[in-house]
Image: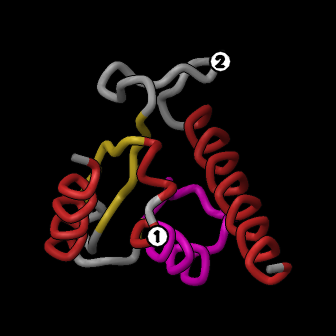
Amino acid sequence: MALKNSNKLSQTATLKQILKRCSSFGRKHGYDAEGRLPDDVPKGHFAVYVGQNRSRYIIPISWLAHPEFQTLLQRAEEEFGFSHDMGLTIPCEEVVFRSLMSLIRSSDV
């Protein structure tokens, strides 16, 4: 039980660090001084960049709770760390990411 709680705390800390990193990136790249999102990012969503061409996807914050998406975030942390100015980049082929998006959307229904 303690291991499960420890793992959950570790995931929560990692997610908070990712979100903090996203907000500091945003202030440098198009977000205003109050941290408001660009017009094309609705409230409750955030942008990620995927694939070799770094295609931009707008996804709901609720996806942070999905184990499949958390796996991608862990891969992003391992590959890129948190100290870069590239935005939240997901190390995944676009076709795989789109399949994951479909899977997550269908599980949200």
Residue 81 is one of the magenta-drawn residues: yes
User: In the rendered structure, which disc, 2 or 1, sits on the residue that comes first in sequence?
Assistant: 2
| Mark 1: secondary structure | helix
Q: Which residue is tagged 1?
A: 67
Q: Is residue 41 above or below residue 20?
A: above
For the point 79% across and 80% down, the residue is 1
Q: Position of residue 13 (x, y in %)?
A: 76, 60
Numbered tag placed on residue 87 in the rendering: none
For the point 21% across and 65% down, the residue is 103
Tell me the magenta residue range.
Answer: 70-89
Task: Tell me which amino acid carries mark 2.
Answer: Ala
For the point 70% across and 52% down, the residue is 16
For the point 16% across and 69% down, the residue is 99
- Locate residue 49: give its quadrant: bottom left
Q: Is residue 43 above or below residue 90?
A: above
Residue 104 is one of the magenta-drawn residues: no
Q: Residues within 10 Å of mark 2 (few under 14, many from 20)?
A: few
Q: Position of residue 106 (x, y in %)?
A: 18, 56
Q: Residues within 10 Å of mark 1 (few under 14, many from 20)?
A: few
Q: Which residue is tagged 2?
A: 33
Q: Residue furthest right?
A: 2
Observer-side mark, 2 or 1, equals 1
* Separation of residues labelled 2 and 1 (CA atoms): 33 Å
